[in-house]
Amino acid sequence: MSNRLDRATSPYLLQHRDNPVHWQEWGEAAFAEARERNVPVLLSVGYAACHWCHVMAHESFEDEAVAAALNARFVPVKVDREERPDIDAVYMSAVTATTGHGGWPMTVFLTPEGAPFFCGTYFPRDHFLRVLAALDEAWRTREDEVRASGSHIATSLAEALQPPTPYAVEPVGLSSAVGLLARQFDHVAGGFGGAPKFPPSMVLEFLLRHHTRTGDRDALAMASRTLEAMARSGLYDQLAGGFARYAVDAGWVVPHFEKMLYDNALLLRAYTTWWKVTRDPLAERIVRETADFVVRDLGTDTGGLASSLDADAAGVEGLTYAWTPEQLREVLGDDDGPVAAEILGVTTEGTFEHGASTLQLPSEPGDRGWFDDVRARLLAARAERPQPGRDDKVVTSWNGLAIAALAGAGAAFERPDWVAAATRCAAHVLDVHVVDGQLRRASRLGTVGTARAVADDHGNLAEGLLVLHQVSGEPRWLEAARQVLDTASDFAADDGGFHDTASDAEPLYLRPRSAADNAEPSGQSALAGALVTLGAVTGDTAALAAAATSTAAGMGLAVREPRFGGWSLAVAESLVTGPLQVAVAGSGRDADALEAVARRSPSPGLVVVRGEPDASGVPLLADRPLVGGRAAAYVCRGMVCGLPTTDPHELAEQLAAQLGAGADDGLGGLGG
């Protein structure tokens, strides 16, 4: 046997192709070998941007003694969690249930049938060797006990991981969720809870939507404080834009430096909403810089968007991003260096490691032109440093999030280049990731992987395509979204929600189903949100009914633990508001003015389409004539429309009035 990762499409797996460990990819061949040899399977799960995954790789998987022990007594299987989130989810549930915590690298030992019997995360080399010896001895001398332990874990998890009871989508539950969030809010630094602190992008989107619908000042205050704090902190790249994965401290000073596409897509959407609500210039700057970062630094030659940038460069975490006062002086000179250090929070003691500091911007500099010049010089100098590696794998779900964010921001800020980037991305995913009518999870360098798409791939891609349809007016994106959502029934659960995997997907020891929105929307909330948008764009009442039922299936957790139900709550706000629709019929300057008002409205779940009356393939423009020969806007809520208007100011008033109606009568006839 030998290492068999050389044909993998995952950059993470390819990082391990030269290990002395005889790795192979997840599949029947690995488990058949384990059954034939009657040895356990070592399942090692990580991802390319994971710092501690790299540490364990260098300490253990590149070590000949570790490799010899693994190869002799186990079948080593390596999985990229970003390629196979289903495998990651079911085995992470075992890790957290048996150890009380989770994380990556994930290290799980399985029976040849796939049942987990020993779970952990990172192990130092010497500890790992002792674990291997102990588990080998246990398997050889007490195999029946080990198998029984695996069966017990699998059975117990199947019983414990039942979905929460559905909760009706009602305004009172959404208000209650805001109250629970207020109890956990960090009034000093923003965000929720303590260290480590993750950007709560979907919760912020919910809070902004709730404020827009109800006028709740506490919801806006929590969102605004957090969005400003993150934008001014070390979590945000003050030179190139874009956000890191999380902060290791409660004050957002020191990030875990990897940059993920899904974080930046979700935050781009949240900052766009914040700008629509407040017109805060900080929000606009962050939107512009983050969108440019996504397109510039994560764009690929194929048109898709790469997954992440590593935390490490040349094996050192944060090497690219941290600065000392002397380094600033070397680049900027004796006059500008000390001033920049004071503005950017670079201290003699350092806020990070080895006397270096992360860059922060607690307040706006007095001379913006001077500061922009400083940023440009620092960024040019930083480009000469070792750069983080890039995981150029194109993930369907995350590209869907980015399509929605870029297209929406492009429409709001009149940036056709962002819309063009979203269009290229959508075309790539549809051209490459759909094989024989079936959606796949990921590709790299234009070659699609074998892993099937999971529920969030379908939901997030469909949502992105539906936003792109609204912005471009092109029917092809609507038709593609319909096709993606036509398969939603393959994921359906008995309570109206959705499993993470299709009914005919590869069986695992559990069928994964996550009700929680963690770093990204769960499959259930992603599909529910896309169904809301589809129903609003097309007038499809069946889609809206399915959206209401599936959202209710996720609300049981969301109303109890709103920090882990952000997207479910945001989708629920769209349902409670109507959803609202605006059709702008016509062309020319009058239509431009009406469209601008609609595009910049913060109304939760608002869908906007513009085009000629009765444009083919655009349902919202059917039977929408011009008024007196002029472009007209039609505002509808819950499929009930008001009189058309040709006046942008009147359109703004109509949208504001509809928000008041949404606050008064709940679901607008959609039911719970």
Image (cartoon, grey):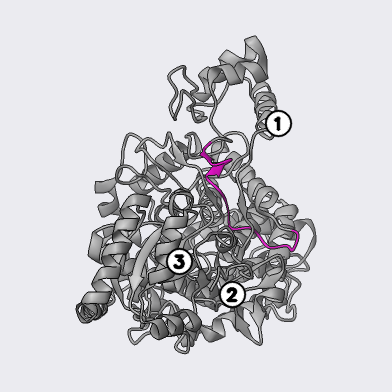
Q: How far across and down, in percent of the image, does residue 22 sit?
A: 51, 68
- The numbered disc on residue 380 is 1
**321 shown above or below 651:** above
Return the x and y of residue 231 as percentages of the image width and height. Answer: 50, 38
Q: Earlier in the sequence, mark 2 or mark 1?
A: 1
**Over which residues does the magenta segment extend?**
301-318
Q: Mark 3 belongs to which amino acid? A: Ser
Task: Choose mark 1 or mark 3, whichever is in front.
Answer: 1
Judging by the rendered image, the residue that carries numbered circle 2 is 537
Tell me if residue 218 comes above or below residue 479 in the rendering. Answer: above
Q: Is residue 619 left or right of residue 140?
A: right
Q: Is residue 368 left or right of residue 179?
A: right
Earlier in the chain: of badge 1 and badge 3, it is 1
- Residue at the spot 60% in from the left edge and 62% down from the top edge: 14
Q: CA distance from mark 2 to mark 1?
A: 45 Å
Q: Secondary structure at mark 2?
A: helix
How far apart, in angstroms, are the residues tagged by discs 1 and 3? 43 Å
Mark 2 packing: few (<14 Cα in 10 Å), some, or many (20+)? many
Tell me, for residue 24, which label it has, or none: none
Residue at the (36%, 54%) spot, across then down = 122
The tag on residue 574 is: 3
Magenta stretch holds residue 307: yes
Residue at left offset 51%, top offset 64%: 82
Q: Amino acid at mark 1?
A: Ala
What is the magenta segment's predominant secondary structure?
loop
Q: Nearer the viewer, mark 2 or mark 1?
A: 1
Give the residue type that dot 2 points to.
Answer: Val
